[in-house]
Image (cartoon, rainbow, N blue to C red):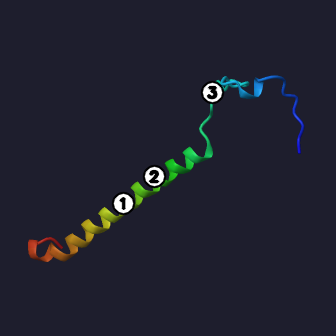
Amino acid sequence: MSQHNIVGSEAFEKAPFVYVRKVRPGGLRRRRARTALAFVAGAAVAVAFGAVATILAFGPALGIS
């Protein structure tokens, strides 16, 4: 068990002992952004393949191909 020098009621104060002035973006935020970017890229590829498939399916009837 660790030993601490806690005197009086300082352990129960509401104010933080160390003030954090600036927090740099962490790994979780970058990972979430990367996941969102991958999802958007995947959706764009799916839409592109869907458009190509539609053109190939209905192209001869429309005179495209």
The image position of residue 60, as x and y in percent, is 13, 77
Query: Which comes sooner in the sequence, label 2 or label 3?
Result: 3
| Left or right for 30, reference 5 | left
Q: Secondary structure at mark 1?
A: helix
Element on which disc 3 rests: loop
Q: Position of residue 43 (x, y in %)?
A: 36, 60
- Give me the C-alpha separation between circle 3 and circle 1: 35 Å
Considering only order in the chain, which callout, 1 or 3, is on the residue closer to the N terminus? Answer: 3
Label 2 vs 1, first from the N-terminus:
2
Give the quadrant of the C terminus: bottom left
Callout 2 secondary element:
helix
Of 40 and 5, nearer the camera is: 5
Q: Residue at x 20, y 70 (%)?
A: 55
Q: Nearer the viewer, mark 2 or mark 3?
A: 3
Q: Dot 2 surroundings within 10 Å: few (below 14), some, or many (20 or more)?
A: few
How much space separates mark 2 and mark 1, taking CA atoms? 10 Å
Name the kind of residue labelled 2 in the image: Leu
- Residue 53 coordinates in the image, percent (x, y): 25, 72
**Amino acid on which the number 3 mark rests in the picture:** Lys
Kindly give the residue lying farthest to the front in the view shown: 8
Q: Looking at the picture, tell me which residue is in the foreground, 28 or 53.
A: 28
Distance of label 2 from label 3 (alpha carbons) = 26 Å
Residue picked out by circle 1? 43
Residue, x 34% and y 65% (percent of image)? 46
Q: Which residue is mark 3?
A: 22
Examine the rendered structure and indicate whether residue 11 appears above or below residue 2.
above
Labelled disc at residue 37: 2
- Tell me which residue sits at (55%, 44%) in the image: 29
Count of marks placed on residues: 3
- Residue at screen point 15% across, 74% down: 58
The amino acid pointed to by label 1 is Ala
